[in-house]
Amino acid sequence: MRFRPIFASLIVAAVVAMSGLAQAQESAKIRFGVLPVLQALPLFVAQDKGIFTKHGVNVELIPFNTAAEKDIALTTGSIDGYFGDLLTAIVLKANGRDVMSVATNYDTRKDRRMFAVLGKPGGKYKSAADLVDVPVAVSSNSVIDYVTSQLLTSKGVPEDKVASIEAKNIGLRMQLLLSGQVEAATLPEPLVTAALAKGAVLLADDSGLGESQTVLVFSGPFMKKNGKEVKAFLAAQNEANNLVSADPDSIRGVMVEHVRLPEPLKATYPVPHFPKLFAPDKEAVQAIVKWLHKRGVITTALTYEQVVDAGYLP
């Protein structure tokens, strides 16, 4: 009679399965806001490759078309965290929102850029140093505005001679540049590569600047209540970063599906490399706070500890 040990084994298996199910049900779901941009690629990889599930964390990626929509969703509690630029996270914090940056997911190093100042096709300007009192099309008081200011001043343009013209919509900004309606504009990748292919002139980019950090942000109340889930989320994200960097060819399909790429670049645009997660740079945080405070965007001179909580990093 062998049915008894078999029956007992089935009971044990059922108990284990039910225990795992109960544990999963007890874990809080993380509703995480994303944009269809290159810097968010590891988030899509962690979702599509089952890495979040592997780390025992229940994550729902909530797509947004604009950063403004995403910021509003976090402040109203519609999402628990989001991916975005460090500058915006600082502005939210200064405006009294209980949010914390827990990790840097992507930054600019010598071998990669995130933003570039471009001159119009056939224009007379050949370097960012030439843009003294020349309006550059940007989205005001944004990370693009900040990076533009940093790039121009680093090339010798006096701070009071950095000029800009408002063009919030990125697609419109690119068209204004390519049609010659503005002398210069700052764009993100992959639009930089697309614009260069259409005759735009590279005046400066942020590779090696270390200012363009994109971060993972959570609401303070969610972090305090669900610290275990936040740690598991970051561990999964770290694994996804490693996978993208180790085997980029296997990730192209995920990139093409989730990231907004110009059609001509879908087959050729290089899959970017991502670093191991690390705490946002203290000097970068302080520089952004100083810039925002000087422009009157924020009135509170935040400290690093008020902006960053690196205690959840793997």
Image: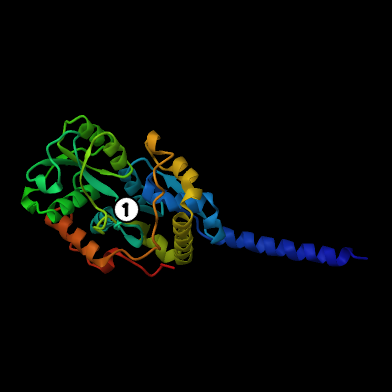
State the image coordinates of residue 221 (x, y, percent, origin top left).
Answer: 38, 61
Question: Which scheme is used to colour this image of the protein?
Answer: rainbow
Query: For the N terminus, which image quadrant?
Result: bottom right
Estimate how packed mark 1 is, as few (under 14), some (14 to 19) or many (20 or more) residues with alpha carbons within 10 Å: some
Q: Which residue is mark 1?
A: 112
Q: Residue at x 45, y 41 (%)?
A: 256
With 134 as the anchor, is 228 left or right in this view? right
Q: Residue at x 46, y 51 (%)?
A: 248
Give the vertical position of 172 relative to 276 (above or below).
above
Give whichever of 66, 122 is nearer the camera. Answer: 122
State the image coordinates of residue 210 (x, y, percent, origin top left).
Answer: 26, 59
- The answer to whether residue 48 shows anywhere in this view is yes
- Secondary element type, mark 1: loop
Q: Residue at x 23, y 62 (%)?
A: 284
Give the vertical position of 39 relative to 312 (above or below).
above
With 202 as the anchor, is 270 left or right in this view? right
Query: For the C terminus, which image quadrant?
Result: bottom left
